[in-house]
Amino acid sequence: MREGTNRVEAFSDGVFAIAITLLILEIKVPHAGPEEHFWTSLVGLWPSYLAFLLSFFVILVMWVNHHELIRMVEAVDYPFFFANGLVLLTVTFVPFPTAVVAEHLNTPEAGAAVAFYCATFVPNSLSWGLLFYTIHRGNLFKEEVTPEEISRIRGSYAVGPAVYLVATAVAFYQPWLGLAINCALWILWVRLCYRSKTVDAEMQRRRTTGHHRTASQG
Amino acid sequence: MREGTNRVEAFSDGVFAIAITLLILEIKVPHAGPEEHFWTSLVGLWPSYLAFLLSFFVILVMWVNHHELIRMVEAVDYPFFFANGLVLLTVTFVPFPTAVVAEHLNTPEAGAAVAFYCATFVPNSLSWGLLFYTIHRGNLFKEEVTPEEISRIRGSYAVGPAVYLVATAVAFYQPWLGLAINCALWILWVRLCYRSKTVDAEMQRRRTTGHHRTASQG
Amino acid sequence: MREGTNRVEAFSDGVFAIAITLLILEIKVPHAGPEEHFWTSLVGLWPSYLAFLLSFFVILVMWVNHHELIRMVEAVDYPFFFANGLVLLTVTFVPFPTAVVAEHLNTPEAGAAVAFYCATFVPNSLSWGLLFYTIHRGNLFKEEVTPEEISRIRGSYAVGPAVYLVATAVAFYQPWLGLAINCALWILWVRLCYRSKTVDAEMQRRRTTGHHRTASQG
Amino acid sequence: MREGTNRVEAFSDGVFAIAITLLILEIKVPHAGPEEHFWTSLVGLWPSYLAFLLSFFVILVMWVNHHELIRMVEAVDYPFFFANGLVLLTVTFVPFPTAVVAEHLNTPEAGAAVAFYCATFVPNSLSWGLLFYTIHRGNLFKEEVTPEEISRIRGSYAVGPAVYLVATAVAFYQPWLGLAINCALWILWVRLCYRSKTVDAEMQRRRTTGHHRTASQG
């Protein structure tokens, strides 16, 4: 039924999984002297831990969004491959600004580093908008997807670039506030839950109509 | 039938596979002088080999556990994605404490390094518990899964954090004993084999009822 | 139906996904002094960004081509595995010439570095030709694939090595022109769109004959 | 039908794909002075290129073998997971001896480095034997797999450890001869082609009985 999206899902899952796992390579083992400094050096890596956590979370949120979006797609075409590739490009780029933030968060350049981090999500959110537009224009959504759902998704995508721009501007003067705005957007995305209600309902129906062999015994 | 879990399995498999393979990057090629020292320098990497073996084993055990747990799951929902993401976060973190142990195991800081290693499995085991709780609360288990099985799994998850805390405390004074307690828990996990007996039985039934085209010729 | 190609697709998707994601590791965090130099040092990485973009794009184009080619394949055999492996070998090699270009693009060795970059695509395009030949000779194409399509693909593969050789020769004297010729070929590949019209038509037919349960309500 | 092996295939494919792609990270960009030395420094990396090619080839051969072996497997059980994990452990280890060879092949330590490289394939071939034994003892083979095929595979696995031991011993005195013996074994593996004739025949039958919708028009 969804054969058309199988391989693009596999490739995208691979890229998301690798990008999210490569983040750990940016946390370098500290080299301390006598034992009492061992914990100090580990604790001194807190900017790396924080950057790791933030970027892990945002890539996870994006993977969930990708998963939900593709579930609403019936088949893929050529423009889809390249719009999807653009999203993946901005995802694979995440480890670099993450490393920049990790190295500068406890230096005087924290503001510039966080601004750079926030700024890299502007093209990311634009590429999500392009992917959505490509799916919509190519008539690739499943028939169950209602115009209301499509309007709702379009609305939530429109917010992204604006919030990231604000976060970037704020970060120059208040790096922590900039980071907080960024994270607030991600948490918003989690709450938006734009998953297809129709598809969920269909799955629910299948669960309740006893497609399990053992359902009658349950 | 299990369509709902396909992509979360693919993504999780990717993260497990990458985390387990990245471990080898922590073993650096030694640079020795004349030939007689070549083997000495290779042998001198034993803490790296040991840390590699331990972490490979624990990620493998976790992948098997993940595989068995997801086999019992009918469908996934939003909370599941993030509880599962938390498990993956603690799995992708493993290469870092592994590298810390590898660099300090034959130094005076061995105790602290092993304690750090053991301590990082406390959040890991808590995240497994959260994932289990999310599946249970979301009513995501297959109908074949019996309350007895669910009780058994809950019990085995409850043991984890306690044992890791003990291993951490012991490691400060006896690093090797701490590592041994850690490994004992992993071997216990292997033995627990909480795989769904019901699902196995179903698979067995299908094997014996001759679903192969060539079964009658066998 | 296409069971025969499932695992070779999974393995190939993995290699493509990893090769495309490893590219980011070549962009190293710059170490600047006072804050005014932070942006200068980030901007100074432009050869790395450019090489990253180019190589991301070419691996994406190759993945799309691989996807389209395998869609036309019914089953795989031993020679296919090794011809496909040769393609993957040249894909996994891409991060190395990419790093060479990134480090030399703003040095006097730019010409030689770009020539090396272009030259590495000669064996790549030859391996695609070998893969095509292996599929054709092994009679592995689906029955829907017409001789016209096969002729068209053969023609587009024949162009590759020649263009890459020209780009290599030009790059010695005009590195930017050499890069431009390379990219022109990739854009040409995107336009060629050799996807199986027959397979597409079949998918279209299935979409319009209402295989969705909810199609009648749509 | 082969549901039981789906996820272990996905995980194994991931590990193979990552191990084979990480090899490129061992080839470091050379830093030459004036332009005439650019090519000299690139050519001077020949031990890295050679080690990359050899290890890419052996991991590809192993992936093909894994693919063929799992095709003959009906379902997986707990011992299978860990025997398969042991094979993957020795596969993920390959990048390390590869890097050792690459750094020492044009030094006086070439003999020792190649001996180490060959020696690491002894546990690898033993782990393949254990995997085979686990499948056989667990009665996991498909019913179509004949005793003759099983005998043939067992025979080819028995050869591996012995040849690797010989290659290791020879490499101390004649590194190139040791490498040649190693490669000869890999080429032998390719020729052995222990793929299930029965499974192939079944696939052939399905192809010829017109399971394509469009077969009658072909």
Image (cartoon, coloured by chain):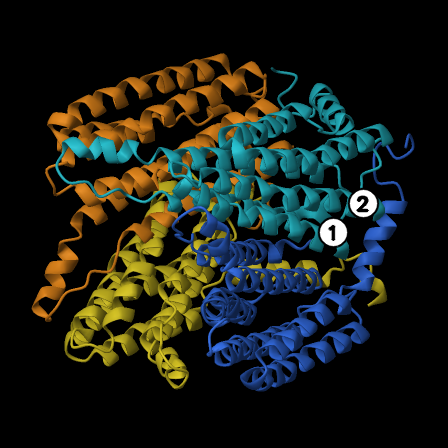
Chain colours: A yellow, B blue, C orange, D cyan
Task: Name which residue lies at 60% across and 30% down.
Answer: D186
Can residue A74 be seen in this snapshot? Answer: no
In the rendered image, which quarter is residue C122 located in? top left
Can residue D7 be seen in this snapshot? Answer: yes
From the viewer's perspective, tell me whether residue C196 is left or right of residue A160: right
Q: Secondary structure at mark 2?
A: loop
From the viewer's perspective, tell me whether residue C105 is left or right of residue B48: left
Which image quarter holds the N terminus of chain C?
top right
Q: Nearer the viewer, residue D135 or D10?
A: D135
* Marked residue chain, label 2: D
- Kindly report which numbered mark, 2 or 1, lies closer to the viewer in this rendering: 1
Task: Name which residue lies at 62% across and 29% down.
Answer: D185
Q: Amino acid at mark 2?
A: Leu
Q: Residues within 10 Å of mark 2 (few under 14, many from 20)?
A: some
For the residues marked 2 and 1, what is the alpha-carbon distance in whole angstroms? Answer: 9 Å
Q: Which residue is mark 2?
A: D140
In the rendered image, which quarter is residue B151 located in? bottom right
Q: Is residue A155 above or below residue D54?
A: below
Q: Amino acid at mark 1?
A: Phe
- What x and y, as percent, mark residue B83? 54, 72
Rendered image: mark on residue B2: none
Task: Name which residue lies at 65% across and 46% down.
Answer: D123
Q: Earlier in the sequence, mark 2 or mark 1?
A: 1
Labelled pair 2, 1 in contact (Cβ < 8 Å): yes
Q: Which residue is mark 1?
A: D80
Number of marks in the image? Answer: 2
Q: Is residue D22 above or below residue D186?
A: below
From the viewer's perspective, tell me whether residue D157 is left or right of residue C174: right
